[in-house]
Amino acid sequence: MLQLKLLALTLIWWSCINLDYAAAATRDTRLINSGCSPFNASNTRSFFANVNDSISELRGEISNQSLHFGTFKKSRGDVNTYTMFQCRNYLSKNDCLACFNNASIQIRDICKIANGARVIYNDCFLRYESERFYQQTNELGGGVTCGNISSNATNLKVVGQQVLNDLQLATPKTKGFYAATKTKVDGDRAIYAIAQCVESATQTKCLDCMQVGFNNLQSCLPNTDGTAYDAGCFMRYSMTPLFADNQTIDIRPYLKEGGSSKKWAIIGGVVGGVVLLLLLFALQWSRKTKKVHRGDILGATELKGPVNYKFKDLKVATKNFSAENKLGEGGFGAVYKGTLKNGKIVAIKKLVLGKSSKMEDDFESEVKLISNVHHRNLVRLLGCCTKGQERILVYEYMANSSLDKFLFGDKGVLNWKQRYDIILGTARGLAYLHEEFHVSIIHRDIKTANILLDDDLQPKIADFGLARLLPRDRSHLSTKFAGTLGYTAPEYAMQGQLSEKADTYSYGIVVLEIISGQKSTDVKIDEEGREYLLQRLFINDTVHV
Ligand SMILES: *[C@@H]1O[C@H](CO)[C@@H](O)[C@H](O)[C@H]1NC(C)=O
Ligand SMILES: *[C@@H]1O[C@H](CO)[C@@H](O)[C@H](O)[C@H]1NC(C)=O
Ligand SMILES: *[C@@H]1O[C@H](CO)[C@@H](O)[C@H](O)[C@H]1NC(C)=O
Ligand SMILES: *[C@@H]1O[C@H](CO)[C@@H](O)[C@H](O)[C@H]1NC(C)=O
Ligand SMILES: *[C@@H]1O[C@H](CO)[C@@H](O)[C@H](O)[C@H]1NC(C)=O
Ligand SMILES: *[C@@H]1O[C@H](CO)[C@@H](O)[C@H](O)[C@H]1NC(C)=O
Ligand SMILES: *[C@@H]1O[C@H](CO)[C@@H](O)[C@H](O)[C@H]1NC(C)=O
């Protein structure tokens, strides 16, 4: 997929190269990269009214204030739209405006009614999303476009590498995250180079992005030009002037090591301490206020629709579904750890659903639906694979496995803060499934084994939507209800009555287990006799945990 994209980009490049830009004054309007969210805006009217408003606001900021970077959030009802633009700083106001105007038309041409879109040009970029993305830098994974003309300058490679290396180190330290240099190569030939991060990024994220850009862009040398881009940064070099000589920026001060670093370390320590204290206060406070802001969510442009994986690739990824790769056995089949060709680690679930024509028909549409569910407390479905009778789902991989391994296994002991976070996060994920996603999804099998924990021990609910794949006649008690003993609401287990409340009941059991550390199905034997968790908590006069 990536290779194809690169090939396509290279082809675009080739078809444009003979435009031959003569001087710095001739602006470069080539589209370098574009991306559209695979999902359409759910309320197109409000969303694009927001987009239009944001575009005119940002256009105003360019023309009235000569800004080269801007973000704008616009809301209508509960429809939010986040927009960002950036011009390369060497552009005049009018050139910036021209690029922006072009971008604002092309972005709609390319992405139609998608709820996220990005266009990247050599001169500027524009992006909008339905989620906040301002701090993102590397999420795109980085792309590079190299010119196809090889230079005859023998030392271009050496000089070029030095130039790009200096830029990646200096740019994150400059004000405004921007640097532009001109460096002599030989005779009267020089290499012009610029690097830029979005101004809303942090210094660390800018540096991360620069490093990827630097690695990618080096591969263009010794060709006469190249461009590397990512979600939050841009790097370019060319042997043709990109800007006037008086527009370069002296980056030498940012490359010096040591010097006043000790003084800064002390100041940094003091400031850091104060900031830490303030952060602690802020944390306390934000916990009291209902909404906790957790920074950026991946914009939808970076998300992909469900991928159709090849069976043979998944076979290779899991070493032919070997026992050694098996992570566990769930209600719907075995789960394996797999390493895809691109190095990404995933969880691969081989479904056992039995033969049913409903499933054959519905599988793809259900997978599409489930893969559309994005929430930080829900495990993301990446794609699927259908081969003969095989139905396989591919999920993001959770390194810390599931909650039951912590509560009842030997994964370690959770402290109260972690337990609190898990209880809250699970509730958020469940509320999203029930109320916020456009189709209400009842999970039907909420239990500790279905709550996975990420690297930060934040919970993510797994297996949601799968019960929808069961044939209707199997979806209630008669043969096998889609639940687990000990967690299932009585009215669902006995009468097959299904509503969101069944999930809420199971969630309650999970909460009790998290607090008590006792399995709902385990009998606890003490001096008062044999008791199940629920008996122990509610049948006695006092509730004791
Ligand atoms: C670069 O691409 C142009 C346009 O496709 C082509 O005419 C030219 O021969 C290529 N140059 C090299 C060195 O491959
Ligand atoms: C988005 O809308 C376009 C029509 O503009 C349609 O062709 C496409 O299938 C829709 N995509 C999704 C994911 O619904
Ligand atoms: C947004 O602007 C475009 C182009 O100016 C126009 O075609 C479209 O109708 C506008 N959309 C909304 C919702 O205002
Ligand atoms: C820019 O100036 C125009 C006219 O002077 C005004 O209508 C508009 O509100 C201004 N926009 C911004 C963002 O300042
Ligand atoms: C935008 O740039 C392209 C060239 O990449 C050009 O063909 C098009 O006319 C431009 N559109 C506008 C509105 O300037
Ligand atoms: C390199 O190419 C340029 C034209 O691009 C030419 O003027 C110059 O003489 C060449 N230098 C060498 C060393 O071949
Ligand atoms: C840079 O030089 C141009 C003339 O080549 C001049 O018009 C411009 O004002 C100069 N800019 C700065 C910042 O000195």
Image: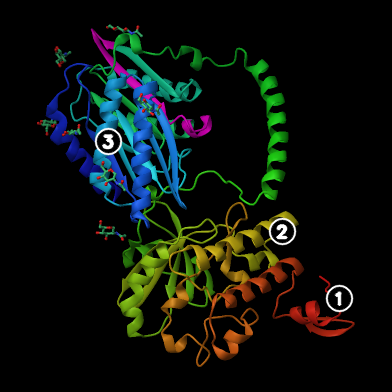
Image marks 3 and 1: residues in contact by CB distance under 8 Å: no
Image mark for residue 401: none
Examine the image and state in which quarter residue 127 appears: top left
Q: Residue furthest bottom?
A: 478
Q: CA distance from mark 2 to mark 3?
A: 50 Å
Q: Which mark is residue 103?
A: 3
Give yes or no for residue 192 being in the magenta stretch.
yes
Where 371 falls versus 139 (above or below)? below
Task: Work out whether 310 lies above or below 470.
Answer: above
Is residue 304 shown left or right of residue 30? right
SS assignment at label 3: helix
Q: Nearer the viewer, residue 3 or 99?
A: 99
Name which residue type carries label 2. Leu
The answer to whether 255 appears left or right of 393 in the picture is right
State the residue position of label 1: 542
Q: Position of residue 526 (x, y in %)?
A: 86, 80
The residue labelled by disc 2 is 414
| Residue drawn at (60%, 86%) of the image | 491
Relative depth, front residue between 511 and 411: 511
Q: Which residues are magenta?
A: 185-206
Q: Is residue 164 left or right of residue 220?
A: right
